[in-house]
């Protein structure tokens, strides 16, 4: 299975690429900086050099030819301002959806965020409010694309533990933390679970093994 991951050098993406390579799949990661290519190659992923903020759906679609699925795991990052929340977290996600449609790639996994909502209100932190709105708008745009078999994954607060392999995965879980390693494991399982298309799911740490949590959604 060939999966192209936008934001290929991100923390979740690198974990996902390693998992996919280890199970015999062919992961590819879209990276903006040439110096990141060797990090992907080292874990068995193909680097694809492209700036998602400076390309077109047609150019991106060319990289997706022959892919079985795409994953949007890009993000402007915690140190970025409100403008890049829009150009990366919103616009690049929509760009990937448009490119996937052009390339005939139906399966689309979105790494979103718990609390994502195009009308989110978070006056205590205007930049975070923009982030939640950007993610919500991207989710809405992807869900509106009939040509895609999308699944939207909304993790809770991300942590950097080794992963437990046990999660809570449901349309609504309530607030909670989750290791990035477990987010990657859930994404890997969702890629081979076509029956989860059309679902928006929240994810936190929990008691159910990843495979069982995904299978329960069928």
Image: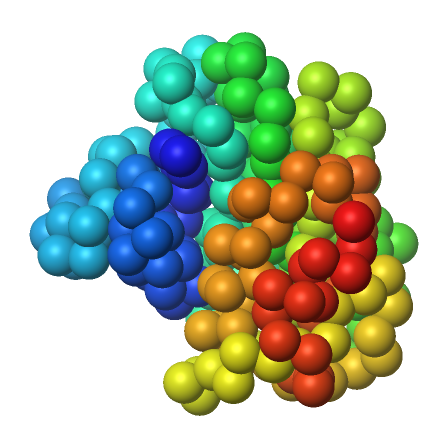
Q: Report x, y in % for residue 126.
A: 72, 69
- Taking the image as shown, residue 206 lies to the left or right of residue 100, namely right
Residue 136 visible in rendering: yes
Tell me: residue 172, above or below residue 141: below
Q: How is the image coloured?
A: rainbow
Instruction: Give x and y (percent) for residue 84.
Output: 52, 51
Check the picture and name the quadrant holding the N terminus: top left
**Residue at position x 47%, y 82% from top?**
163
Q: Is residue 95 left or right of residue 68?
A: right
Q: Is residue 80 above or below residue 9?
A: below
Residue 84, can we see it? no
Q: Who's the residue at 25% across and 34% down the image?
A: 48
Tell me what residue is drawn at x 50 percent, y 65 percent: 185
Quadrant of residue 138 in the image? top right
Badge count: 0
Identify whether 158 is placed above or below 56: below
Where residue 72 sits: x, y (%)? 53, 44
- Height in image: 204 above or below 161? above
Q: Residue at x 78, y 49 (%)?
A: 218
Q: Name the side, left or right, on which 168 lies relative to 1.
A: right
């Amino acid at each position: 299975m060939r999966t192209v991951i936008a934001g290929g050098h991100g923390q979740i993406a690198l974990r996902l690429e390693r998992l996919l390579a280890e199970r015999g799949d062919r992961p590819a990661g879209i990276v903006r900086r040439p110096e990141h290519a060797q990090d992907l190659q080292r874990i068995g992923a193909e680097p694809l050099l492209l700036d998602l903020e400076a390309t077109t759906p047609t150019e991106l679609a060319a990289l997706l030819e022959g892919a079985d699925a795409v994953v949007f795991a890009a993000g402007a990052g915690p140190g970025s301002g409100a403008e890049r929340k829009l150009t990366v977290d919103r616009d690049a996600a929509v760009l990937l959806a448009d490119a996937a449609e052009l390339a005939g790639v139906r399966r689309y996994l979105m790494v979103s965020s718990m609390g994502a909502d195009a009308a989110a209100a978070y006056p205590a932190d205007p930049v975070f409010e923009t982030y939640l709105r950007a993610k919500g708008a991207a989710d809405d745009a992807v869900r509106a694309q009939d040509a895609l078999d999308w699944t939207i994954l909304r993790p809770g607060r991300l942590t950097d533990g080794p992963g437990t392999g046990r999660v809570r995965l449901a349309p609504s879980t309530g607030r909670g933390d989750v290791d990035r390693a477990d987010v990657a494991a859930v994404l890997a399982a969702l890629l081979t679970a076509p029956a989860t298309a059309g679902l928006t799911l929240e994810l936190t740490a929990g008691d159910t093994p990843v495979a069982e949590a995904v299978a329960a959604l069928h």
